[in-house]
Image (cartoon, rainbow, N blue to C red):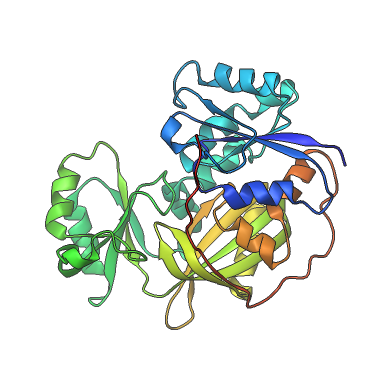
Amino acid sequence: MKDFNVLFTCCGMHVSERIDNLRNNEDGVNVKVFACNSNPDNLPYGLGVDRYFVVPPIHHPDYIDSIVKICLENHIDIIIPNSTIELQFMADRKAYFEVLGIKVSIASSETIKISNNKLHLYERYASLMPPTIATTSFQDLLSFDASIPHDHRLCVKLTDHCGGNGFAILDDEKARDITLFNRYGENRYVSYDEMEQVMRNLDKSILVQEYIDGTDYSISVLADNGEVKHMVGYIGHTMSFGAIEYGEIRNNYYAEARVRDICRDLNLDGNVCFDFRIDKDCKVYLLEINPRVNASLPFVAKAGINMLYLRCKQLLGYSIDGSYPIKGRLKMKKYHEFKYFY
């Protein structure tokens, strides 16, 4: 196994353990990690990255040229996109990078169009997901609200952002409870009056969905052109901005079966995270798919399988077959620490 270099695009301060996963790999390979972001304040300073780069925003005409220049000058072998908002853009240009000898860790453009967009995902898998509409009309929201059980709530989502962004639960009482504002581990709430004001100015549809009270459950997957090679599921006991703060490795065979079916159907490839919700009656609902590296991959690595490193091996043409015993019931809590740098 040869040494290789990786570039994290749209890279922020949450990648410390991902860097460790690449560097402290099972083969003892020397992996250099580079990072870029259009906002210099978001770069992962002090986290052991070999070099940082400030680049133009994704849709700037010079963005691709900037990434290519970084890759060629630093002998980058693999680009790993980190943000939901860049996935379609990078998937559309995957072949261009491969001509230059640079692998991009992403599925095909056609696959990303469905898996990375909540509306397209619902259109394809409505039977697996909570009832949902896409609308710009507050009256549509109210009509939809009347159609769900009276003791259930609604949530709103942006179609092309991850669950941590553009998400809120409609709840008049909690929206006005200032003790919940920015409270650690709390979901965000919006009142109906506030939502009416927001929807007056919408320039594109948002998703309005029945909110499922219950437990967050996710499955991290490493897929090979539709075939699940490895997967690990875990409960999110405590969540903050869409990411697990306190979690536990746990199987759910129904969710695992759905993951295999969807991977095959969409021809998913590489690192993928499936987010579910399990209600009080143990019914499992698919919420979204994140066809990229996700924040809990270091947790999965501690449980027994380093999916981020295996993805790099896969892209470089090495086998990723093999058995990796998983530490069931392993628990994880995030503890935040300071980093100091010049």
Left-right relation of 226 to 291:
right
- Position of residue 24 relative to residue 147, above or below, is above
- Position of residue 312 relative to residue 123, above or below, is above
Left-right relation of 31 to 36:
right
x then y, percent, for residue 61: 47, 16
x then y, percent, for residue 145: 23, 65
Give the residue drawn at x 86%, y 37%.
2
x then y, percent, for residue 285: 47, 68
Left-right relation of 55 to 302:
left
Give the residue drawn at x 75%, y 24%.
101
Quadrant of the rendered image containing residue 222:
bottom right
Give the residue drawn at x 67%, y 64%.
302
Q: Using the image as rendered, state which of residue 211 and residue 247 is in the foreground.
A: 247
x then y, percent, for residue 245: 47, 65
Quadrant of the rendered image containing residue 190:
bottom left
Give the residue drawn at x 59%, y 63%.
219
Please state, as top left, top right, bottom left or bottom right, where the N terminus lies in the image: top right
Q: Is residue 252 visible?
A: yes
Quadrant of the rendered image containing residue 201:
top left
Q: Is residue 226 visible?
A: no
Q: Using the image as rendered, state which of residue 211 and residue 185 is in the foreground.
A: 185
